[in-house]
Image: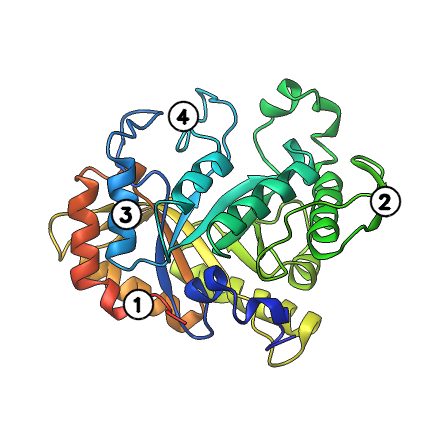
């Protein structure tokens, strides 16, 4: 362990590019496109925009796991399967971290998730960081034949989480799950993660208590939290981490939100549920405050953006990113 982190993460290209103690970095939830009045993106410039995000030196790109469009939810994410898409992006990029925000562990068999994530990790030379979640859209569970598991999805999440850890970090393991089957040490899941571990950040609470998250996860990925409440939340998180891993332990906290950067750089920043909207100067002030409180990464979802994504990236890269640079080990 290093500062409470698993030793494999100290030199992990993806994790160490995004997360550093007392540092805040910036990334994007895919697709890097504004589509404020639609449930689905066009993906017209998706490759050009992901390449631009890397060229400008943002820290990470995060793919969402939305297997089915629920019109009442109103957002299909990037539409493409997260691991197929990240595998494609692994061959089109060189250094930007590739993450999920988040993989719904309860709707996938954990051996498949482990193999998919480890395969992308191999193709990207160790740049994969997993946000993992229990899934909170009830409509998906009957579609997967899991309606009986919705109320017990917290337990299902823990079993999937432990299975992924077992098959990615051990060889020919003996492992038993009441929901996902058993392995008796005669078969192995390949490939293994390039650096020995898939970093996993629990998203939201995922029906777990905070001590469990602090002990088992490599970090915590949360939603937009207003600054006046963020300090208390981070005190709770850091206290749980120190209780689980020691007084000097570091496990990062990341926050994702819809983001609409306005053309007026001095427009006050408004926090509206899951969305932030405002000009770059108020956004800089917000990020400085968030960093001081202990936020380590912000994942911006441009779905709500009313400006072309290229304009937004270039403005952020010129005026904001230099203050919160990616970590280049």
The CA distance from mark 3 to mark 4 is 27 Å
Q: Residue at x 45, y 71 (%)?
A: 20
Give whichever of 206, 324 is nearer the camera: 324
Left or right of 112, for residue 271? left
> Can residue 152 be seen?
yes
Q: Earlier in the sequence, mark 3 or mark 4?
A: 3
Q: Earlier in the sequence, mark 1 or mark 4?
A: 4
Q: Nearer the viewer, mark 3 or mark 1?
A: 3
The CA distance from mark 3 to mark 2 is 42 Å
Residue 279 found in image quarter = bottom left
Give whichever of 87, 52 is nearer the camera: 87
Near mark 1 (Cα within 10 A), the count class, few <14, some 14-19 or many ≥20, is many
**SS category of the residue bearing label 3:** helix
Near mark 3 (Cα within 10 A), the count class, few <14, some 14-19 or many ≥20, is some
Quarter of the picture containing the N terminus is: bottom right
**Whole-percent x, y for residue 319 in the image:** 17, 63
Q: List the residue tagged with mark 4.
A: 74
Near mark 4 (Cα within 10 A), the count class, few <14, some 14-19 or many ≥20, is few
Instruction: Evaluate if marks 1 and 4 touch, with contact meaning CB atoms under 8 Å apart.
Output: no
Q: Earlier in the sequence, mark 3 or mark 1?
A: 3
> Can residue 277 be seen?
no
Q: List the residue tagged with mark 2.
A: 186
The CA distance from mark 1 to mark 4 is 32 Å
Q: List the residue tagged with mark 3.
A: 51
Q: List the residue tagged with mark 1.
A: 324
Q: Residue at x 80, y 43 (%)?
A: 187
**SS category of the residue bearing label 1:** loop
The CA distance from mark 4 to mark 2 is 45 Å
């Amino acid at each position: 362990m290093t500062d409470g982190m698993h030793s494999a993460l100290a030199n992990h290209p993806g994790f160490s590019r995004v997360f550093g103690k007392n540092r805040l970095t910036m990334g994007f939830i895919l697709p890097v496109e504004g589509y404020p009045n639609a449930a689905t993106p066009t993906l017209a410039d998706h490759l050009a925009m992901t390449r631009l995000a890397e060229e400008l030196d943002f820290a990470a790109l995060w793919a969402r796991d939305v297997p089915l469009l629920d019109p009442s939810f109103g957002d299909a994410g990037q539409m493409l399967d997260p691991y197929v898409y990240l595998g494609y992006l692994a061959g089109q990029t060189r250094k930007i971290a590739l993450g999920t925000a988040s993989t719904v562990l309860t709707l996938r068999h954990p051996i498949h998730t482990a193999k998919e994530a480890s395969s992308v990790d191999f193709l990207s030379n160790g740049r994969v960081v997993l946000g993992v979640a229990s899934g909170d859209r009830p409509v998906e569970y009957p579609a997967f034949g899991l309606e009986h598991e919705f109320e017990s999805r917290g337990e299902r999440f823990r079993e999937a989480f432990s299975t992924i850890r077992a098959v990615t970090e051990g060889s020919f393991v003996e492992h038993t799950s009441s929901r996902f089957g058993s392995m008796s040490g005669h078969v192995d899941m390949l490939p293994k993660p390039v650096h020995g571990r898939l970093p996993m950040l629990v998203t939201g609470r995922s029906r777990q208590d905070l001590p469990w998250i602090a002990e088992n996860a490599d970090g915590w990925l949360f939603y937009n939290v207003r600054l006046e409440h963020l300090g208390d939340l981070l005190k709770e998180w850091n206290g749980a981490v120190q209780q689980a891993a020691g007084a000097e332990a570091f496990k990062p906290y990341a926050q994702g939100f819809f983001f609409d950067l306005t053309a007026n750089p001095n427009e006050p920043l408004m926090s509206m549920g899951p969305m932030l909207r405002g000009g770059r100067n108020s956004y800089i002030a917000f990020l400085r405050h968030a960093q001081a409180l202990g936020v380590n990464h912000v994942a911006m979802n441009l779905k709500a953006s009313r400006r072309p994504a290229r304009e937004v990236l270039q403005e952020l890269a010129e005026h904001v990113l230099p203050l919160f640079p990616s970590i280049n080990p």
